[in-house]
Amino acid sequence: MRTHDGYEIDDDRDRLDLDVIWSFLSTEAYWARWRTRPDVAGQLASAWRVVGAYTSTGEQVGLARAWSDGVTSAYLGDVFIVPEHRGRGLGVAVIEEMIDNGPGAHLRWMLHTADAHALYARFGFAPPDHKYLERQRDHVSELRQSRDS
Ligand SMILES: CC(C)(COP(=O)(O)OP(=O)(O)OC[C@H]1O[C@@H](n2cnc3c(N)ncnc32)[C@H](O)[C@@H]1OP(=O)(O)O)[C@@H](O)C(=O)NCCC(=O)NCCS
């Protein structure tokens, strides 16, 4: 655990507040609104590492979640700071704790985001090279539909 401007940045998963996380992801996160609350609970429970931002009174105001094999690569997702607490460096602090300060500093990291590319560029994220291949989720459902019909 470390502090930033009076906030605590902590990877203790016992501190996670599912009500806060679910409230944000189900209403404000353009990338996550389709998930169910059990989906999110399961994603947190199975995460390789989670980093939360907390006020001095223990209220959760931010999150970063990662899954990884702990050896070669890791994926960063569900990064958010609740609106009332943005603009104070908490986004950077949470990402820094996840990427640079934790056990994953030596890993290859991946993420998807429609915005905040400049923020992630500070941590070395850049468009992938020619070796990176990806299968879209829509493609998976199309394949399943054709298989099941
Ligand atoms: C992106 C987000 C996590 C940043 O949180 P924050 O606590 O306000 O960020 P910080 O105060 O640490 O800001 C760090 C820097 O990133 C910049 N930044 C913040 N949000 C940004 C965005 N959406 N796009 C580009 N840059 C952004 C800030 O301007 C700041 O730059 P500066 O230091 O040069 O002034 C927050 O705005 C958020 O939760 N947004 C909604 C969720 C989201 O879009 N997540 C990213 C996709 S995973």
Image: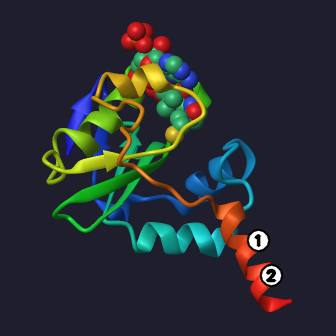
Q: Dots 1 and 2: beta carbons under 8 Å?
A: yes
Does residue 121 appear left or right of residue 106 in this picture?
right
Instruction: Provide residue 29's location: percent of width, then percent of height.
Output: 66, 44
Q: Specify the quadrant of the image occupied by residue 121.
A: top left
Q: Specify the quadrant of the image occupied by residue 13.
A: bottom left
Name of the residue lying farthest toward the front? 130
Q: Which residue is mark 2?
A: 146
Q: Is mark 1 within 8 Å of ligand 1?
A: no
What amino acid type should be assigned to the residue bearing mark 2?
Answer: Ser
Image point 36% across, 38% down: which residue?
129
127 or 43, nearer to the observer: 127
- Is 29 placed above or below 3 here? below
Which quadrant of the rendered structure holds the C terminus? bottom right
82 or 146, nearer to the observer: 146
Instruction: Say how the picture is coloured.
Output: rainbow
Q: Which residue is mark 1?
A: 142
Instruction: Provide residue 78's location: percent of width, then percent of height.
Output: 51, 49
Image point 60% across, 29% down: which residue?
83
What amino acid type should be assigned to the residue bearing mark 1?
Answer: Glu
Gap between marks 1 and 2 measured at Cα: 6 Å
Name of the residue lying farthest toward the right? 149
Image point 70% across, 43% down: which residue?
30
Secondary structure of the residue carrying tag 2 is helix
133 or 89, nearer to the observer: 133
Q: Residues within 10 Å of mark 1 (few under 14, many from 20)?
A: few
Whether residue 88 is visible to the viewer of this picture, yes or no, is: no
